[in-house]
């Protein structure tokens, strides 16, 4: 089932217009890598409940986190290194996919300084982990209205326990009541990222050359931008505009599109 094209990319469906249709901070990481490397790719947008079926037909094991056992991104690659891992050439999860693409399509590199770039990614990702909890209360309640009907039902049910058992509108309402506290977390933890960016010769963490650390961060900012433009405006105004310059520089890679390809997913087998 490996794709005849270099890469087939599975993304999450939304009804958002144009390039904003791609909204997940995890799938956007891989979209940015594919576009930066100018890898020809096809793409399919799936509803949330179809991801389990995709894992089953591609012989991908579920994730260890049972709350999020079936997630995107997933790619199909016709490169031998992918076939060695999976009979269909299927790879899951953002980091393994990105590292596969770096090996299969080495130029331009997404690790421009080698191991130092990877260490930078780890450091940036740790800081992002401190910021994520603030966003999870503010943004996911806004996502559900842009999903298909099946996706909405799945999202309501799967996120309810993760977000304290409250209905999504109540989660958003409570988050807005606590906004000053949540914003303080975003502002405080973002200061470390701004410090790394400040004074660089270019807009990226390593100056003029983008890398995985940049793609990881701008994918989170794009997620916010898709659903809460007011909050996004506050984020890119932090510091001396470092986040805004980074986002503008990376925008073409976040917005690039592959060739749409319909992918019919059969119903998942009961587990």
Image (cartoon, helix red, strand yellow):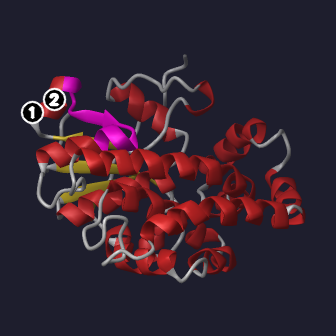
Q: 203 and 230: which one is in front?
A: 203
Q: Please report the residue visible at 55 percent of the width from the left and 61 percent of the height from the top.
A: 192
In the picture, the quarter occupied by the C terminus is: top right
Viewer can see residue 72? yes
Disc 1 packing (10 Å; few <14; some 14–19; many ≥20): few
Tell me: residue 130, above or below residue 199. above
Disc 2 packing (10 Å; few <14; some 14–19; many ≥20): some
Q: 57 and 243: which one is in front?
A: 243
Give x and y (percent) for residue 199: 40, 76
In the picture, the quarter occupied by the N terminus is: top left
Q: Is residue 140 left or right of residue 12?
A: right
Q: Please report the residue visible at 43 percent of the width from the left and 56 percent of the height from the top.
A: 216
In magenta, the rendered stretch is 85-97
Give x and y (percent) for residue 92: 36, 36
Residue under label 2, please give it: 83
Farthest residue toward the top?
A: 271
User: Is residue 26 rendered magenta in the image?
Assistant: no
Residue under label 1, please give it: 80
Q: Please report the residue visible at 59 percent of the width from the left and 67 percent of the height from the top.
A: 224
Q: Is residue 72 left or right of residue 256?
A: right
Viewer can see residue 87? no
């Amino acid at each position: 089932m490996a794709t005849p094209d270099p890469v087939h990319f599975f993304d999450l469906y939304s009804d958002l217009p144009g390039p904003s249709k791609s909204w997940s901070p995890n799938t956007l990481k891989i979209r940015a890598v594919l576009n930066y490397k100018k890898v020809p790719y096809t793409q399919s947008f799936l509803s949330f409940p179809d991801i389990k079926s995709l894992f089953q037909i591609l012989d991908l094991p579920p994730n260890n986190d049972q709350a999020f056992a079936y997630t995107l991104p997933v790619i199909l690659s016709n490169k031998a290194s992918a076939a060695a891992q999976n009979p269909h050439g299927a790879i899951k999860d953002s980091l393994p996919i990105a590292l596969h693409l770096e090996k299969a399509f080495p130029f331009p590199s997404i690790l421009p300084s080698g191991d130092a770039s990877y260490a930078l990614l780890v450091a940036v990702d740790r800081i992002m982990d401190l910021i994520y909890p603030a966003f999870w209360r503010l943004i996911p309640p806004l996502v559900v209205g842009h999903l298909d009907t099946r996706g909405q039902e799945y999202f309501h049910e799967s996120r309810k326990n993760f977000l304290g058992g409250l209905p999504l509108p109540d989660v958003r309402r409570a988050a807005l009541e606590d906004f000053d506290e949540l914003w303080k977390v975003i502002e405080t933890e973002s200061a470390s990222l701004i410090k790394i960016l400040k004074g660089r010769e270019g807009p990226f963490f390593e100056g003029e050359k983008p890398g995985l650390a940049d793609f990881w961060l701008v994918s989170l900012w794009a997620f916010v931008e898709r659903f809460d433009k007011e909050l996004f405006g506050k984020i890119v105004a932090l510091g001396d505009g470092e986040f805004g310059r980074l986002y503008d520089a990376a925008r073409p890679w976040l917005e690039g599109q592959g060739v749409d390809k319909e992918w019919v997913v059969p119903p998942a087998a009961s587990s």
